[in-house]
Image: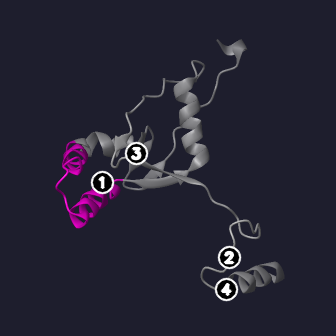
Amino acid sequence: MNSFKKTYKYVSEIRPYSYQKNEKKLREIVTETIIPSPVYEEKSTQILECVQKLKQADLSVIQRQKLRNQIMKYTVNVPYYHWKSYQDALNSKKTSGRKAKYYEPIQIGKYEKIKVMECNYDKKGYSPIEWTKKTEDNE
């Protein structure tokens, strides 16, 4: 409890914009923004319509932001290691169970893409698929 109180006091006393990136006292959480495959498969028409509209040159900044927000409502942030596990499954021929399905990233800006990831997604939310490698003995 003392450790918690000490950490809580430290964090609560940090002033806005005073924390330096190179300070290692806070845990770094790395996530990847993705569209879950079940959501993409259900809502692909709406997503791709927004993408096509974003390609129009005569859109105002506000219209672009509204379209981006419509697309972003279909996204979730997942731990980076889940994304990495999925990428490894795509690149590996030694996965147990079925082969991972590849989805083309969604281009929402000149330099920005949203990735689509094969995973489980239902009323309860996101859950990863376990992509484990077989050993050579199991082949």
Residue 76 seen in the current view: yes
Residue type indicated by callout 1: Ile
Q: Which mark is residue 19?
A: 2
Q: Nearer the viewer, mark 2 or mark 4?
A: 2
Q: Position of residue 73 (x, y in %)?
A: 33, 59
Q: Real-space Cα distance between discs 2 and 4?
A: 12 Å
Q: Real-space Cα distance between discs 3 and 4?
A: 35 Å
Asked if the residue at tag 4 contacts the one at tag 1, i.e. Cβ–Cβ closer than 8 Å, the answer is no
Q: Which mark is residue 12?
A: 4
Q: Quadrant of the C terminus?
A: top right
Residue type indicated by callout 2: Tyr
Q: Which mark is residue 71?
A: 1
Q: Real-space Cα distance between discs 2 and 1?
A: 32 Å
Neighbours of disc 2 within 10 Å: few (<14), some (14-19), many (20+): few
Region of the chain picked out in magenta, as a range: 45-74
Q: Which residue lies most toward the left here?
A: 58
Front residue of 39/32: it is 32
Q: Upstream in the sequence, badge 3 or badge 2?
A: 2
Q: Quadrant of the N terminus?
A: bottom right
Q: Real-space Cα distance between discs 3 and 2?
A: 29 Å
Q: Which mark is residue 102?
A: none
